[in-house]
Image (tube, helix red, strand yellow):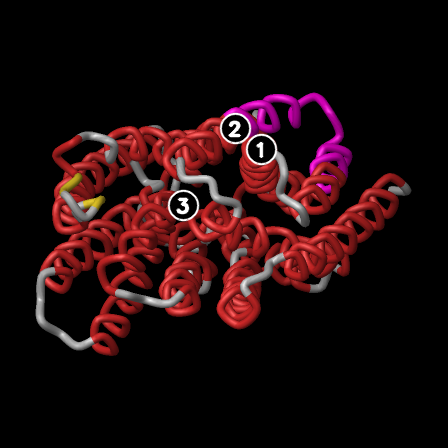
Amino acid sequence: MSGSILLFPLISDSLILKESFKIIQVNLISSVSQLGMYVCLPVLGYLSDIYGTYLLALLAIFLLVPPYLINTLVINSDFDHTSKLMIYSITFGLIGLGTSSIYFSSLLTCSKIYPHKKGLSISLPVACYGLSSLIGSQILKLSWFHNKEGLNLSRVFQFFAILYLIVGSLNFISTSIVIEHKQSNIDENTELIPISSIEPPNHQEKFMKFLKSPVMYILLISLFLNIGPLETFQNNLNSILRLNHYKDLSKQISLLSIFSTISRLIVGITSDYVNKLFILVTILFLGIINQYLSINYDVVSLITIINGFIYGGLFTIYPTILSEIWGVDILGSTWGLFMISPAISSTIFSLIYGSLLDNFNDISQYFKLVTLSFTISFMLAIIVAVKRSKK
């Protein structure tokens, strides 16, 4: 259940109605949560590579449970509009960081247990991340989470606080067991310093090689140009649907989650047998087509389905490519560094979207911009594919 952050469109819709927030204010909260998810990932990845994934599992508990409890108090408080906006921004930023901690803990644990099946070992925890949002969207349909005004945010926040206390504890126990099992298999000639408390052999050398690679920067820019628009779409799905007089937000979130999960599994499995860069290029080409369709948004469900498929596929194929080129043993550091890109990208695209919608009530120009963004990302992926094929 690590994907509650993906349910933000449901929460943001209630914030707009209950707290009278504007679209750009909700996007500010969303942007801070995205920054929380991504900006600290280089540090989290490095800590995981050095000390083990159990540390991230422990951090997740303290970063998820208190913020949700604080939100429960704020939603029923008499704080003024500005104070609530500031508090929600801080708490959702922490929730984003906690989400990344629990997600990264699971992903890196699986990738290091099964290093010879990179695609499958990465796709399974990534798929579960997408599946958790689907389960969460169905749970929030229960009448207990609703009142006359719509979604009862107080109960929603209480539920997630309790849930993450349980899930975080189980995750901490499971990752600790994996580390103990690895240490119990060390032979008698191994140094007595635990393997989870020292830097892996050649970690710094490998990471410096990664930083000096032109391929890394091309892939990083490519990721910047596609993930930001996709996350902006998801976080603003409520307003997009409202503009097109479509009311079933829960159905669209379910479609996003279902096809995101399916994509993660398909891409993860096929990437062990098919050229990974070819898969990336194919997904980005599909992204160009879908963003072009989104300019008019005549086929709501189809666009939502393709967005979910692309989002899940990209979040699976990029770390798989990184692990193949630079190795699984520094994946925490490499993929963690890559996550800075969507942090900035999501913030920029969300604020552009909110500004265009609040000022002009028209998002066709936004989707034209996103179509161009995906086209450039597609071209960069082709450059990397050609460059790698010559080796």
Q: Label 1 belongs to which residue?
A: 309
Q: Residue at position x 60%, y 41% from top? A: 314
The span from disc 3 to disc 1 (Cα, nearest Å) is 21 Å
Q: Main secondary structure of the magenta part?
A: helix
Which disc, if any, is residue 259? 2
Q: Position of residue 322 (x, y in %)?
A: 63, 45
The span from disc 2 to disc 3 (Cα, nearest Å) is 21 Å
Asked if residue 333 lies in the magenta stretch, the reply is no
Q: Which residues are magenta?
A: 262-284
Q: Amino acid at mark 2?
A: Phe
Image quarter of residue 207: bottom right
Q: Label 3 belongs to which residue?
A: 104
Residue 316: tell me if it is visible.
Answer: no
Q: Quadrant of the C terminus?
A: top right
Disc 3 packing (10 Å; few <14; some 14–19; many ≥20): many
Q: Amino acid at mark 1?
A: Phe
Mark nearer the N terminus (1 vs 2): 2
Circle 2 SS class = helix
Closer to us: 155 or 20: 20
Q: Quadrant of the N terminus?
A: top left
Image height of 258 relative to 46, above or below: above
- The residue mark sitting in front, 3 or 1, is 1
Q: Position of residue 276 (x, y in %)?
A: 71, 34
Circle 3 SS class = helix
Residues at marks 1 and 2 touching, judged by CB atoms closer than 8 Å = yes
Q: Amino acid at mark 3?
A: Phe
Asked if residue 264 lies in the magenta stretch, the reply is yes
Q: Position of residue 385 (x, y in %)?
A: 82, 43
